[in-house]
């Protein structure tokens, strides 16, 4: 019996794209679907708010003489650049596949997320450096102006977090944006707490201590994002899904499948899981083998969330002309 290949690219690709985006929206269904807001709109709002906070903190830092506000403005500038990269990647990722780019541009999102993670690490080092500088050269800023700017920044960052919340679990770029915004929110909260303590006690060392604490939180989120992006770029199996899982699922659900081997499992972009595998079945006519492939494709979709599957049918042995057999 000749080998049979099931590609079904037209319906697999469209469903994979749908699956990747649907996962990003489902977690925020109650909040965001009521507003009819897609992920690009969420990102655009976050970019606009971040730009406004950046200008406000830069002006406020100069007026009040607050190094904390100026440092946070630099932090916001880094975030703004990263968010713009993510939005550009989202737009590029939606371009259809072509003869040259058969997978489309979904991997641009992962590359942007990896770049975001690297900016997180740079930002953490910058915050830590500024904190140690403040320990060495303590100064008391105009805490009233500093507090007013911090309150406005905190509320604006909270609004950005509200826009992005819900899509951060399955969409790697929304996740990156959300970590940025949460870092900004933590920074604003830290500045607010620092203002209150400084106003009551005059302890200037409180500000750099809070800055270091925020830097550690950002570093933790950056490491998780970096690890996730790297896993996709290395074409590792998606988290929670292994080749052993695929083999057992297919064999348990479809009795006609005797063995499954040559299983390759990877993600092209966030949420777009691809699979190739060989299915060993009893020698039979091609139409019956086709039914097994179609059933296996349905099982992979419903049980494993895999919408890109290329399956090859094999008989238990292949008989050569001279009668010898090879496995």
Image (cartoon, helix red, strand yellow):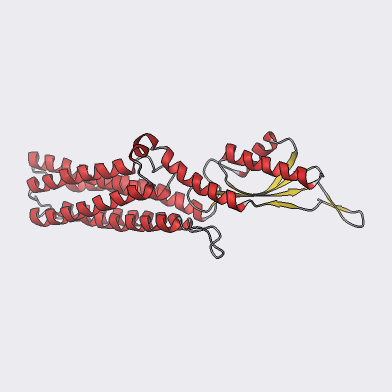
Note whether residue 48 is visible: yes
**Front one among 261 and 133:** 261
Q: Whole-percent x and y of residue 205?
A: 15, 46
Q: Quadrant of residue 323?
A: bottom right
Q: Whole-percent x and y of residue 9?
A: 60, 53
Q: Name the residue: 8% across, 53% down.
A: 64
Note whether residue 213 is visible: no
Q: Name the residue: 8% across, 43% down.
A: 202
Q: Is residue 268 left or right of residue 315?
A: left
Q: Quadrant of residue 35?
A: top left
- Number of numbered callouts drawn: 0
Q: Name the residue: 15% across, 54% down.
A: 67
Q: Is residue 47 left or right of residue 238?
A: left
**Front one among 137 and 148:** 148
Q: Is residue 119 left or right of residue 233?
A: left
Q: Whole-percent x and y of residue 127?
A: 25, 53
Q: Whole-percent x and y of residue 137?
A: 13, 55
Q: Residue furthest right?
A: 322
Q: Residue furthest bottom?
A: 100
Q: Is residue 61 left or right of residue 244?
A: left
Q: Name the residue: 26% across, 56% down.
A: 126
């Amino acid at each position: 019996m000749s080998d049979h290949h099931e590609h079904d690219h037209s319906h697999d690709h469209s469903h994979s794209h749908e699956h990747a985006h649907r996962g990003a929206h489902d977690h925020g269904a109650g909040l965001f679907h009521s507003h009819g807001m897609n992920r690009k709109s969420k990102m655009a709002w976050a970019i606009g708010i971040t730009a406004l906070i950046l200008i406000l903190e830069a002006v406020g830092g100069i007026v009040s003489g607050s190094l904390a506000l100026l440092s946070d403005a630099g932090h916001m500038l880094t975030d703004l650049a990263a968010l713009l990269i993510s939005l550009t990647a989202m737009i590029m990722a939606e371009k259809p596949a072509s003869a040259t780019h058969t997978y489309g541009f979904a991997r641009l999102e992962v590359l942007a997320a990896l770049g975001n993670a690297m900016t997180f690490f740079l930002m953490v080092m910058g915050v830590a450096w500024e904190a140690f500088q403040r320990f060495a050269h303590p100064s008391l800023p105009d805490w009233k102006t500093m507090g007013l700017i911090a309150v406005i920044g905190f509320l604006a960052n909270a609004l950005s977090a509200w826009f992005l919340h819900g899509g951060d679990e399955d969409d790697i770029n929304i996740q990156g944006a959300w970590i940025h915004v949460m870092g900004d929110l933590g920074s604003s909260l830290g500045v607010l707490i620092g203002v209150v303590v400084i106003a009551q006690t005059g302890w200037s060392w409180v500000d750099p201590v809070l800055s270091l604490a925020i830097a550690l939180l950002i570093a933790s989120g950056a490491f998780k994002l970096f690890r996730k992006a790297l896993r996709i770029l290395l074409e590792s199996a998606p988290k929670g899904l292994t080749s052993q899982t695929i083999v057992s699922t297919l064999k348990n659900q479809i009795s006609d499948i005797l063995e499954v081997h040559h299983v390759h499992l990877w993600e092209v972009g966030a949420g777009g899981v691809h699979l190739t595998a060989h299915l060993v079945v009893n020698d039979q006519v091609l139409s019956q083998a086709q039914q097994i492939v179609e059933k296996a494709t349905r099982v992979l979709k419903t049980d494993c969330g895999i919408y890109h599957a290329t399956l090859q049918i094999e008989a238990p042995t292949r008989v050569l002309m001279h009668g010898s057999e090879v496995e």
